[in-house]
Each structure stands twice: as structure tokens, then as C-alpha cells.
Amino acid sequence: MKYLVAEKGGESQAIGLEELSEGLYEVQIDGVTLHVDAAKSGRTIYSIIQDGQQYEAMAEEKGAHGFDVLVRGQLFHLEAQDERSQLLAASAQTVAEGKQVIEAEMPGKVVKLEAAVGDTVVEGQGVLVLEAMKMENEIPSPIDGIVTEIGVSEGEAVEGGQLLFVVEPPEQAD
Amino acid sequence: MKYLVAEKGGESQAIGLEELSEGLYEVQIDGVTLHVDAAKSGRTIYSIIQDGQQYEAMAEEKGAHGFDVLVRGQLFHLEAQDERSQLLAASAQTVAEGKQVIEAEMPGKVVKLEAAVGDTVVEGQGVLVLEAMKMENEIPSPIDGIVTEIGVSEGEAVEGGQLLFVVEPPEQAD
Amino acid sequence: MFKKIVIANRGEIAVRVIRACRELGVRSVAVYSDVDRDALHVRYADEAYHCGEPRASESYLRIDRILEIARESGAEAIHPGYGFLAENGDFADRCEREGVVFIGPRGDVMRSMGDKVTARQTMEKAGVPIVPGTTERLSDEQATEWAHKIGLPVMVKASAGGGGKGMRLVRAEKELAQALKRARSEAKASFGDDSLYIEKFVEEPRHIEIQLLADTQGNAVHLFERECSVQRRHQKVIEEAPGNGISEDLRARMGAAAVAAAKAVGYAGAGTCEFLVDRNDDFYFLEMNTRVQVEHAITEAITGIDIVKTMIRVAAGEPLPFRQEDLAISGHAIEARIYAEDPDNNFVPSPGQILVYRPSGGIGVRVDSGVYQGAQVTVYYDPMVAKLITWGRDRDEAIERMRRALFEFVVKGIKTSIPFHQRVLNNPIFLSGRYDTGFIDQHMDGGKGGSAISGAEKEDARRVAHILAAIAAYRRDKQRANAATATAPVGVEAPWKSYGRRSQMRGMLR
Amino acid sequence: MFKKIVIANRGEIAVRVIRACRELGVRSVAVYSDVDRDALHVRYADEAYHCGEPRASESYLRIDRILEIARESGAEAIHPGYGFLAENGDFADRCEREGVVFIGPRGDVMRSMGDKVTARQTMEKAGVPIVPGTTERLSDEQATEWAHKIGLPVMVKASAGGGGKGMRLVRAEKELAQALKRARSEAKASFGDDSLYIEKFVEEPRHIEIQLLADTQGNAVHLFERECSVQRRHQKVIEEAPGNGISEDLRARMGAAAVAAAKAVGYAGAGTCEFLVDRNDDFYFLEMNTRVQVEHAITEAITGIDIVKTMIRVAAGEPLPFRQEDLAISGHAIEARIYAEDPDNNFVPSPGQILVYRPSGGIGVRVDSGVYQGAQVTVYYDPMVAKLITWGRDRDEAIERMRRALFEFVVKGIKTSIPFHQRVLNNPIFLSGRYDTGFIDQHMDGGKGGSAISGAEKEDARRVAHILAAIAAYRRDKQRANAATATAPVGVEAPWKSYGRRSQMRGMLR
């Protein structure tokens, strides 16, 4: 079985995978064949042994095909999927393009609006300031674009998942 | 709802119980009415708050109606059941009388037989010595009686659950 | 000694105080809000009373309810921990009026120190050096004038400030207005008081603080210094004791100044004098914290003194059980504050259920925490989930232990700042011990920079990560194939759903 | 220093050594049997190799396989921990022949000490006082003669003995034959050598041992004493450092004797001289353990010395980094060995899956453990699941901490000896510090006696227990009512089944 794995944004590499027995895999990667012993304890913690090397690693599902993998304190945002569902992947990877709908991650309070509907913003520019868990967090725009909607007002308490604002690429916003 | 609670062997007391809301109970005991907040975390750990007093306690099911309850480092072997199933209880409590079938708790090795079929033994007298987890453990007779069967021989490796020996009260053994 | 104490707090510090009570044979009374019924501090306490709704203002800050609980439970004293009511002088007065011992200094002492402007005035009188700047509250206009008078760069600070809240550094003219606005709004939100003052910004400042213990008989000692210069957005994240390259002479002078400050205000209990030390080893009074500090544990590690038990003893009227000459520094200690936040995503808070919790252990390691596996980290309170403290015979050993302990520490379900701490512990500037409060901004790109491991190790980790991603995907697909038959474990599906949801949002935020 | 070390052990001591390796920057290679793939020591290691089947003789005792793993992994040294191959002189010789450093003394040194009879001869020559008794192996007949010659009571001991295995006290004539039989069978099973010797039984003996560290340059120091008189069936269960009422003079004389013993045999590495101290403070050499002890951590707590790191350093050829005069005792430490056994049911072993694991934390507490929540305690190895160590400025504080830490420690799924330790920590004889190795038999009814709490508290606990039993029954009944619809969580049902089964059997055994 073949899986395509890619860092978010990067191009994908093919990894051949065959489960020889429960938790033991034959892996094709970079043209070499490895035997990987992946023991799982709990829901997301693995102990990987490959050629004697032991790694305690964690893999947490992130949406459709995403996995956040933590190894040796390094976090990797990866997309992994069966070759056949590659097409789906293509679309899944376009998340960070086009119209951006920003929602609140958790309950909090809007301390300040730093942009208004119609404003042009650059990627990383703060659109509003949200206070949650006693900390003020500036919520930036993920792309260069135009703010086409703001769902909250200053001082408003927001719930997790509530729409904060929408940013659209220039060509789309009109 | 009424529950009958007794220490193994002792006589039982009635405890009135009504769940006012999830985890909150009105309890009748010793002629007084208490409100008990029993929050459960994990499978067997409770935090009990009654009249402000907080107890972290554990209750583990033991067979039909038994519960081993650990409070403040004290272990209580209790039988608890709904009043209506009291009759069942009566029979359940006779476990420690009559014919005693002793099985191995875990894999181990029979180091020594200290009694033979036909021997008269008193309660607590060693019948055989089992080695498990690097420790020798003497397995005593739970009652005064006569050894009517020995299922193992010296040096034999035994599996958990394997029959070790049977002791019967004198009047029964003949 | 008291027979019973109410701990008017939650989380790790409530657990810390309850531990002290149990060791003293004092009964502990926990208080809990709706969302804290299952919290660890409730489970460790002898008694527990509900104090209100999740929002702190409706529970842990409810003076009337806290005092009612003290009466109900028959407690003789209240320990406020840190935060919440810890530095509320009016609360201390209420306690006194109602005949309950407040474990801390008198209300008037707290007020004189709690308001930073008043504190600066008091210290100036006591002859303790203070940072050049204003000693009154300022309007935006006055602030601007002063900024020009003192000359940039300056710090804009909230009079009621503390813990880095309502504080802004202004280097350029144009930043000033914005800084004043943000500082006021934050101050208003945090302390309900938006008055500000201005200080000259000390270049390459090091944050060195002196731990104090004083009794009601007028004895006061210092337990040497802590270095808290590793700060992100004015929040301490890693502390060390003793400080780096602090000469015996400087230590003695700062200790003496701190003791003088304590005596000047008739201080009793545990407290901390915070100083800024500049590149010439000149030091300036910053503020005095009239409570136990988050980072008190590293001082306990190098002195062997139980600070929390001692503050309870002196509150009960006992004299300090030791004098200055009985105290000495042994070895070196480091603390890493582990927050529920995502160091790989701009440190956004990361609440949720802790699915796996495996704290570090073994020699020279101490963990103070308010959580356990299965516990919830809510959005309502401070995001600190644990304090990891290591001790070593010298700084190198303490650092090696901290690296080892960070490697062992497993928290799953929420993101934590552990990877960030690992990056700091690998930073050559930090390792050199010659750093100031600008360290994270200048040498770690505000927290984003640095790496927990070497380039080769990172490539190796990347390879394993890719393989694991493929394996995880394979297992997930396999599981889905049998989805029809299998049933998700009760109580497990829920958190997962919410993760899916949150993570997608985080994806968008990135 | 080495680049890579194989740890030929499992459980907490393997974790302990891996921690030392990580702090030294040495790569650690774990070995694991079939049942230990998920063990903590594997997860903490940099590398891990399978060493065989569950039974120790088929895995952790397989000299060939261990050495093969050393070659495969390119390790330069092997740390044996304690137990298994730790005191196997032939293994040390094999390592030397194959060019791998054995982290411990030379093979011949181990043999001379490992065999208790030879050890007694050696010590006699070195002028170290030994317990009156035989210095040869004995047949049953000779043993009986000697027992008469020396006079009862006597101790029957295995020549190859250690850790209390193959040891019996004989007070009455009629017990002798039985004692010899049992001791031989246990010795045979434990060490594959059933030869015995006899010692005079020292009345009211206290078990005091001296920790040694020696380098290959001929330097040797002692790290003061540990008191290990709290023993159940000759197994240490609670240890203290320093010993109770040990005068500076006695400490110095015992330390000197231990150092003399070490030098007499050209000792290198970490070791322990065990002594019996009688009511007149006369002391007798008991045995020398040529390995790191389970209880080494309490010595680390009062000296600040990392014993395991130091033994690795000296094995690498480094000289001891300190001299005797650099060492001093600071405070008091206590260790409680937490076993998977049921103290309320004759201490029968209690293997199984650990469903809940919440170790103690906070100030002055150290936990060394080889388990985690979800881990399996198997029947194949030593039943110790954790070591709980507390430190205090004095013995009282160490005891208060230990009580507090025992209160906090939660292990569910298996039974543990925690309640037993709580009973000991409440026993007035133990608290007085004046006890000997007969303590548990004479003052705690062999372990059954004593109570963790006062009578009133016990009644209170009983009332709560009854209420909880009713509530648990109610909830169970309610759950059963909906049983049809609900589905048991995957992976949870299994352990429960086995619990039901075992508990019923235990019921029968009772």
C-alpha cells in the first residue's frame, strides 16, 4: 500500500507501507526498505523502533488528512493519505487560499477591532484582539486581501466557533 | 430506594438513597438525612463531598454484590444491594462456608506441598507453597476441614485459575 | 498553629498550600467553582465548598462567599495563594474585621505596595534605589510629556499592575499613543484601574528578585535571589536560583535593601522584592509582591526551606525558626512554567481535556501541578498547567536535568509550551548565563526561534514523523473500514470531535 | 566518557540509569522481553533491542544476547542495574574479554563478595568485624551441629544469598530442619546454588549499611549510612538516611571499616557494606552488595550526589569528583518501596494493568518508577512498581512529607503496599526511631497490624465507605438497566473481566 506524505504546503513523497503483523510494518522510503515496530499506548502515543533506534512520538489527527506529529520535541504538520485519494488531497491543501473564514478558537472577549470591513490587509496583519485565558491575542489575517465581513464588535463576548471575520483575496472581493 | 450494606460477615444496615441530580444524592443513614455529592473521575475513583467534608475514595466491584471500598487508606470489604434482592444476598454471603475450592491467582510454581489428601487442617494452616513474582507464598486453608483433593504436585508450574486443592468441612467430607 | 485553613485559590498553588497544610497537620478547606468540582485541589483537600460560577469574578474573587465558607467550615485563617485575592488589601482588612487570619501582610501594607506608584514613593523614602520615572498617575498628555522629559525608550506601566499585565515598551515616538491605549485597556480589564505611570527603560535589564520572609515579631530575612530574565511579553517563563554571575557583594547589598524595604513597611509573611539590574550591576527597585510567588519553589530547592509552611507558621504568630546566618545556598535550581498554549502557533491558549499526563520524575526533579490525566483545562483561568523544577549541584547539572525532565514530560490532548522550553534550554546565550530580559525577543525571535535538537537529529525526526504519519493514516483508514461494526468508546469520541473542530480553526488562523 | 551504554535491566532501575545517561549526554540502549515492549524504560531510551521471552532466564539473564546487543548497537559499556546480572562475576569477566566495559567492580571482586561465605573470610582477614558463625558451606548435618555449637537463635543463610532470599531465622530446635529445607529450595530457585551457612542471630539487630563509591585510581569514599531495619520477611520495605541515633563516632568508625573493606578487595564503582548493629552499638559485617542498591536514592537526597552518574563516570576511568571531606549530610530522607501486593490479604502479589496512576509530587518528593497509567505489571518480575522518596530538613519533616505523599499516591487496577506504609508511618515505635529488624513482626503483627488513621477517623471513613458502596451499587444497577443499549468501551472490558475473576479467587483464598 502506498501513502503520500507532505509537510503542509510542501510537495509529497511516496511511502510504501505493508503491515507484516500487528504493529510491525515494512516501509519503503527514499528507495530503501525498513522494518518499523510501531507500538501504540493510549490514543495517540507511539513507541517507534526502527533499526534499534527508539522514538516516543505522538500523532494527532488534524482534519481530513492532516496529522500533527511530534518527534523529539519537533512538531511536524503533515498531510498523509492513500495514493488513490490524492485528488481529494489536492483540494484539501487549498485551505489556505481563497476566501478565509476566521472563527474563534475558544470563548473570549473582543478587546479591540484593528480593521474595518473594506480595509485592505496583508498576511499576518492584526484584524482584531481577542482576550482569552487572561491573555490578549492578536488575530492576524492569513492572507493578503480585503476584509469583507466582521462578525463581532468591540467588548463583545464570543463563543468558541463563532465567526470573527472574513478576508477575501483582492481579485475575489468585489 | 433502599440499599442494604454490610461488611463481609457482619450484619447489614439499611441506607436510603435518592439521586436528586447527576451525582448528587439524598442519603438516609443512622436515622439522619445527608446530602452527598459523589463526583466520579476515571472508572473507580470518586470525590465525595458531604457537609463540606471531602473524601477521595475508590470503589471496586467484587463479584456479585461485593465492593472493595478504599477511604482514607482504609479498605472495607462490603456487600451492597437493593433491598429486594436481599434473598440473593443471603446465599451470596455463604461463600466462605461449605466446600472450599482453592484456585491459583496467577501463574506460578508449586514449591512444596504441606498437606496430603485426607489430612485434617485448621483455618489458616498452610496447605502448599506457591512461588510467584519471585516470592514464596503459603496458601492456607480458609476453614477447618479435611483436604479432599490436591490438583497439583511439587515443582509443577501452574496457570492462573488452575485448581490447587479442595477442603471440606468435617461433617461434609465422608 | 491553626486547626483549619481555607485556601482561596485553585490549580497548582492551591495544591501547594494544601500539601503544606497536610504536612503541618492543619485541615485544608478547598473552594471550587462550577467547572472545578473535579479539580485536583478539591481531591487533595480535607474539605471542599462550592464558591460560585466559572468566571473568577463570580467565584474565586467573591469576598463575601469566601468569608462565608470560612465561617461555615470554622476555619481560623485564609491562604490566598497568588492572583485572585492575594494582593487585595481590602480583602485582608475584611478578614481582620471578621476575625479570620489573612495569611499575608496587613491590608495597608499591601495597598502601599500593590499600587506601584505609591510603592515607588515609599521605597524612595526608605532609601531603596528606584527606576527613574514618574511617581504619580498620568493622563495620556502628561505621559507623553514625561516620555519626552525622560527620553525614549520608556516603559508604560499600570499603577495597579503586576505579572506583566498592562505594560508596554516604547522605543519610538509613534508607538507611544498605541502603547498607552493598549496598556490602559489591559489594565482596566485586569485590575479595574487604568491609571498608568512611566519609567525610564533600563537597557539590557536583568530581572533579579529577592525572596523575603518576615514574622510578626519584627524579624525579617532574605532567602537570596532568583533570576527571572527569561520573559515573553513581560511574562516570566523560566527562572533560576541563584542568579547568574551575582557576586557575593551584590547579593548582600540587594538582600539588605530588600530587608530594609520589608522593615520600612512593617512587612510580615512571605514577599518578594523585584529589582532591575543593569549592565553595571546597579540595581533599581521594581515592585514588591506581597504574596508567595509562582517561582518560590526554586528558592526552596537551593535553601531547603519550605516557604509556604513558614508563611503559615508566621501567620499563626510563630517567630521565624531560623536567622539569616542559618541560611545558605546549596546548588542551583531552574523552573520551567508549562502553559497550556501552542508555542508553534503564536502561543495561543490551548484549553481542553488532558488525555495523557505523564510528569517527569527521578532525581532532582519536582513537579507542582493542578492537573491529572483526564482533567480539564478550562478557558476561565490562568493557562499554567504545571511547574517543572530541577535541582543540580551546579547550574550545568540543573540544566542537564531540566533537559532530561522536559524530554520525559508528556501532556496530550492540549498543546503545551514544553517544546519552547526545550528550545530555550538549547540556546547558547541562555546556556552562557549572560542574558537579559530582551533574550527571547532578540535571540529567540520572540519565542518562535531556536530548535530543540540539532539539524541532523531534526532530519532524522522528520523521516520518522513522515513514516508515522503514513502509519497513522493507514491505521485510521483500517479503523474506518470496520467503522460500521466498531463503536467508539464512551467519553472518548467527544474530545476528539472538539479537537477536529478546533484544529481546523487553528489551521485557518495559521 | 562513553558514547553509548546498554542497560541490561528493566523497571524503575533501568529508567533510573537511562535518566543518568541522558543527563550525561550518553546514548542509552534498552533491552526488553516480549512482555516489556510497552514498558517505560523502552520509551525513555534512545535505542531498544528485543532480548527474549518473558521469563528472565530467557531474556534479561541471557548473557550472550545482551553482549550481542552491545555489539549490534556499538555500545562501549553495560550497566546491569540491580538483580539479574548485576552481581554475576562471570558476566563481568565475559564483558571484559569481549572488550565491553562492565559498569561495576571486576568479576573476581564480585565473586569474592557475592559468595557470602568467601566474603566473610575476606572481611575477617581485612579486620572488619563479622557476625559469629561458620565460614564454610554446610551439609544439613554440619549445619545442625554448628547450630548447637553457636547456640540458638541462629540465622540460616544461602551462600549465594542476597535480598533476603534463602534466609531463615531459627529460634527453636524443631524449626531447624524445616528452615534448612525451605532456605535451600529458595536458594536453589533464586541463585541456582543451594549451599548454606549459619550465623549467630544478633538480638535486636539494626540493619545499617554504608554507601561506598570508589574509582579505578584507588580512591574510595563513603556517603554515610542508611538504616534498613524495617523489613518484612527479610525484605526491606522502608529505609531512612541517616540512621537513627547513629553517633558521629559510630558513623566514622563504620564508614572507615567500609572503606577499608572496599580497599581490601580493590573495589571500584558503587557498592554497599551492610552491617548489623546490636543494642551495644557494636557492628558486624553482614554482606557487601557490589551494585547500586534499590535504596540508593535516599543517600542521593541527603548528600546531593548522583550515585548512578558517578558510577558511570568512574567506570569510564574518571577519578571521583569529590573527596571524603567534600561530603556532608543535609537533612533526612525516607524511602517507601511500593510493591504490587495486597497488604490486606497476606501480601499476595497483585499483577495486572494499572488503570489509574497518579504519583505524588510537590516539595521534597521524589518518585522513581517503571510504570505509567495503562502499563502492565506482569507476574514474571519483581513486584516493585515505584519508590517513593521524601526529604525533609529533619526526620519529622521527612515523615510528615512521606505521610502526605502516601496520601496523594493513587494506583488503581492493582493492589499496592501503600496502605501498609501508611500504617508504619503511624506506628509510635517507628516514629520514635528506636526500632530493630524485628519491628514488623513484633510491633505490626507481621504487617497486618496497625492502622493508617485514628479510631474516630476510621469510623468516619467506615460511614463514608458504606454510603459509597450503596451509591456504587445504585449506579451499577442503573447502568445494568441500560446495558442493552450501552456498549462497553473497547479495551476497558478486558481488564475488568480479569479483575472479576481474580477478585473472586482472592475471595476464596481469604
Image (spheres, coloured by chain):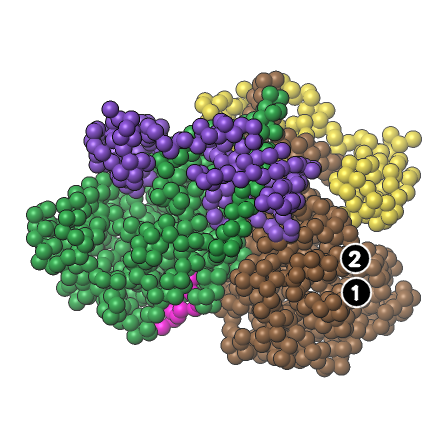
Chain colours: A yellow, B purple, C brown, D green
Query: Which one is earlier in the sequence, the residue at label 2 or at label 1?
Result: 1
> Label 2 to label 1, Cα distance in Å?
9 Å
Give left or right: position of C31 versus B81: right
Q: Is residue A31 above or below residue C170?
A: above
Magenta residues (range) = D325-333
Tell whether B76 sits left or right of C444: left
Callout 1 crowding tier (Cα within 10 Å): few <14, some 14–19, many ≥20: many
State the residue at coordinates (76%, 81%): C125
Q: What chain letter is assigned to the residue under label 2?
A: C
Q: Amino acid at mark 1?
A: Ala
For the residues bearing labels 2 and 1, Cβ distance under 8 angstroms: yes
- The answer to whether one can see residue C298 in this image is no
- In the rendered image, residue C221 lying in the magenta stretch gets the answer no
The dot on residue C190 is: 2
Q: Amino acid at mark 2?
A: Ser
Residue in the picture at 54% in, 78% down: C323
Q: Quadrant of the N terminus of chain D?
A: bottom left
Whether labels 2 and 1 belong to a single chain: the reply is yes
Of D276 and C353, nearer the camera is D276
The quarter of the displayed image where residue A87 is located: top right
Q: Quadrant of the C terminus of chain D?
A: top left
Judge whether residue C247 can be spotted in this image: yes
Circle count: 2
- Location of mark 1 (residue): C160
Residue D449: x %, y % from top left: 37, 52
Where is C438 relative to D41, above or below? below
Location of residue C239 with respect to B92 vertically, above or below: below
Q: Position of residue B65 (x, y in %)?
A: 50, 32
Quadrant position of residue A66: top right
Q: Which mark is residue A51?
A: none
